[in-house]
């Protein structure tokens, strides 16, 4: 703009001098030509600067794609035993939910669990983790948990999120070692931008809560990630983000879900079904969806 204004002023000055007789027509023509050349040069310089800036933006996007994608960090990368249950029973008060449980989970395992409503899928997780206000208990047999194991349980209520905190404060609580810039960057990847990060989590919708919870998990140090019906009521974009994050994650994964499409995309290595008060190994994995679906239907009969 400055170059254009300067060229226009030069042209006006030349015309004024010609009109008042201080210069002849030839000199005035030379001044006009010089101004036009200057304008053309400025335009080329401007176009070149825009092209260079666009190239820098494109290069920056490439460089930051990996940085801003979900990165679920495993607390300890070495393969080790996390949970070993041999012969235990799961009860709620006097009711027997699952008997003679045989379950072994090591870091790197990816298990899926299915079963009818009320069969004990979520209760088993909560009993193992010793969650507060949980009436289900494991009795008899042998129950061994690695003392230093860090497990994160994400259910459909997203209790992981503290609704008294802002979005940014929740992220800071998930990992105190990360910089403000990285936390903002990760929130941006989950579609929380600008002043959104300072909103209180209590005003978020269900889908937004899910995105925030996944964002928090993405920066946490985790040995075992447990997802309880994670795709219920989520939009396609949030599910896509979850799939990408889980496939980058190297720790143990335990998923309670009947969403075969989702399960088929996250490299499940073992399947379990709860049927007739027993935890049974499945014959098929979600990677063979037709056979897995038939087995799932049998489980609900």
Image (cartoon, rainbow, N blue to C red):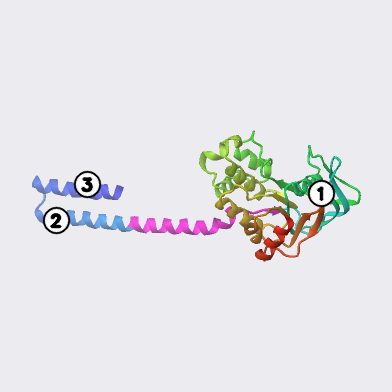
283 is within the stretch colored magenta: no
Mark with earlier residue (1, 2): 2
Q: Are marks 2 and 3 in contact (CB under 8 Å)?
A: no
Local packing at callout 2 (Cα closer than 10 Å; few below 14, some 14-19, many 20+) is: some
Location of residue 272 in the rendering, given as x and y in whole percent from the top left corner: 76, 58
Q: Which residues are magenta?
A: 45-73
47 is within the stretch colored magenta: yes
Q: In this orientation, which residue lies closer to the viewer: 19 or 136?
A: 136
Decide if residue 164 is on the left or right side of residue 283: left
Q: In this orientation, which residue lies closer to the viewer: 275 or 154?
A: 275
Q: Quadrant of residue 111?
A: bottom right
Task: Name the residue tied to disc 3.
Answer: 9
Mark with earlier residue (2, 3): 3
Distance from the alpha carbon under mark 1 to that under mark 2: 85 Å
Location of residue 269 in the rendering, given as x and y in whole percent from the top left corner: 73, 62
Q: Nearer the viewer, mark 3 or mark 1?
A: 1
Task: Name the residue tied to disc 2.
Answer: 29
Mark with earlier residue (3, 1): 3
Residue 127 disc label: none
Q: Nearer the viewer, mark 1 or mark 2?
A: 1
Considering the numbered disc 1 on the image, is that residue within a helix, a strand or a loop?
Answer: loop
Distance from the alpha carbon under mark 2 to that under mark 3: 15 Å
Q: Are marks 1 and 2 in contact (CB under 8 Å)?
A: no
Q: In this orientation, which residue lies closer to the viewer: 281 or 86?
A: 281
Task: Name the residue tied to disc 1.
Answer: 148
> Quarter holding the C terminus?
bottom right
Q: Is residue 176 visible?
A: no
């Amino acid at each position: 703009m400055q170059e254009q204004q300067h060229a226009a002023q030069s042209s006006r000055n030349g015309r004024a001098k010609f009109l008042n007789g201080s210069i002849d027509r030839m000199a005035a023509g030379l001044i006009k030509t010089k101004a036009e050349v200057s304008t053309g040069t400025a335009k080329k310089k401007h176009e070149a600067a825009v092209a260079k800036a666009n190239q820098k933006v494109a290069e920056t996007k490439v460089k930051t794609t990996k940085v801003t994608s979900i990165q679920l960090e495993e607390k300890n990368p070495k393969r080790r035993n996390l949970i070993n249950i041999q012969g235990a029973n799961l009860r709620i008060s006097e009711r027997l939910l699952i008997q003679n449980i045989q379950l072994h989970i090591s870091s790197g395992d990816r298990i899926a669990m299915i079963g009818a409503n009320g069969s004990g899928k979520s209760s088993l997780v909560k009993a193992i983790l010793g969650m507060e206000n949980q009436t289900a208990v494991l009795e008899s047999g042998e129950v061994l948990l690695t003392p230093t194991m860090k497990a994160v349980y994400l259910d459909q209520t997203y209790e992981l999120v503290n609704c008294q905190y802002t979005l940014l404060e929740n992220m800071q609580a998930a990992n105190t070692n990360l910089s403000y810039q990285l936390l903002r960057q990760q929130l941006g990847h989950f579609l929380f931008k600008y002043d959104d990060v300072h909103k209180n989590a209590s005003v978020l919708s269900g889908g937004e809560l899910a995105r925030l919870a996944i964002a928090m998990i993405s920066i946490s140090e985790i040995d075992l990630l447990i997802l309880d019906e994670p795709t219920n009521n989520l939009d396609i974009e949030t599910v896509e983000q979850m799939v990408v994050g889980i496939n980058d994650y190297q720790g143990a994964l335990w998923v309670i879900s009947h969403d075969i499409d989702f399960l088929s995309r996250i490299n499940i290595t073992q399947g379990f079904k709860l049927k007739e008060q027993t935890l049974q190994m499945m014959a098929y994995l979600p990677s063979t969806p037709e056979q897995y679906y038939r087995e799932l239907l049998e489980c609900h009969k």
